[in-house]
Every structure is written in structure tokens, then in C-alpha cells.
Image (cartoon, rainbow, N blue to C red):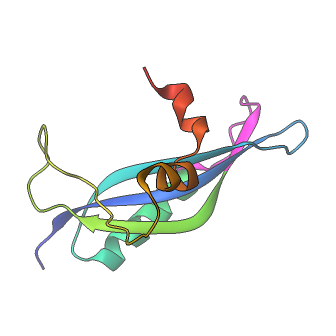
């Protein structure tokens, strides 16, 4: 069976070990060479177990939120190749859409 590149996006919650509090959700997009969407999703779930493994030196823990979305990459990975795209239907204005799905916490990382 032919293998193709898939970009898989997963959501992860970060917790402080000291008190279990959290205010961070991480979106990760990883590439996998797989023969199907199902295989790519299974590979992402396996990788997440490693990613979320407890690090005794760290003051935080990471938990998979169990949310996955896969995208088949049409071209070989290279500079400028689209590795993830998700089209959403909405009646929201541009500003309302950004406020709802991309809250201000993302502004912290803007240059």
C-alpha cells in the first residue's frame, strides 16, 4: 500500500503539578508517513503517549484532550508546502471569528 504524508493536529492541556491548575492548551501539528487517515491518526495517538509521558524533573504535566484532525499533504514536504488546512463554514464576521476561535492568548506569541 502506498504511503503518503499526513499532517495531524492534536490538542493538549498543560497542568501545573503543584496544584493541578491549568490555563494553557497547546495545538500541535505533526507529520506522519502513513497509508491512510486512520493509520496517521493512530500514529498521532501513539506519539501523544510519548509526548505526554511524565517528566519527573518538570513542574508541569501534559494531557491529550483526545481531539484529532488529519490532513493529507498533497506534495512532498518542502519549504512552502501546505501541511495543514481546515475550512470552516461560518456566518461570523472576521473579528468575531478570530475572537471566538483564536483568543487573545495567542497574541502573546506575536512579534
Frontmost residue, 53 versus 79: 79
Is residue 108 highlighted in magenta? no
Frontmost residue, 86 versus 91: 91
In screen coordinates, is 108 left or right of 72?
A: right
Is residue 56 highlighted in magenta? yes
Decide: is 111 above or below 60: above
Q: Residue at x 37, y 68 (%)?
A: 88
Which quadrant, please, contains the N terminus? bottom left
Frontmost residue, 80 versus 57: 80
Decide: is 34 above or below 55: below
Q: Main secondary structure of the magenta part?
A: loop
- Residue 69 lies, in percent from the top left, at 41, 68
Q: Residue at x 43, y 62 (%)?
A: 44
Magenta residue span = 51-62
In screen coordinates, is 55 left or right of 109?
A: right
Q: Residue at x 39, y 65 (%)?
A: 43
Q: Residue at x 8, y 56 (%)?
A: 75
In screen coordinates, is 89 left or right of 26?
A: left
Decide: is 20 above or below 8: above
Decide: is 41 above or below 85: below
- Residue 3 lies, in percent from the top left, at 15, 69
Amino acid at each position: 500500500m502506498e504511503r503518503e504524508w499526513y499532517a495531524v493536529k492534536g490538542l493538549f492541556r498543560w497542568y501545573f503539578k503543584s496544584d493541578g491548575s491549568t490555563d494553557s492548551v497547546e495545538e500541535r501539528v505533526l507529520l506522519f508517513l502513513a497509508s491512510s487517515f486512520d493509520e496517521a491518526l493512530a500514529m498521532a495517538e501513539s506519539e501523544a503517549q510519548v509526548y505526554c509521558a511524565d517528566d519527573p524533573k518538570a513542574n508541569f504535566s501534559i494531557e491529550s484532550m483526545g481531539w484529532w484532525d488529519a490532513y493529507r499533504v498533497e506534495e512532498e514536504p518542502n519549504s512552502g508546502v501546505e501541511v495543514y488546512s481546515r475550512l470552516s463554514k461560518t456566518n461570523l464576521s472576521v473579528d468575531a471569528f478570530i475572537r471566538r476561535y483564536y483568543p487573545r492568548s495567542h497574541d502573546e506569541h506575536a512579534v
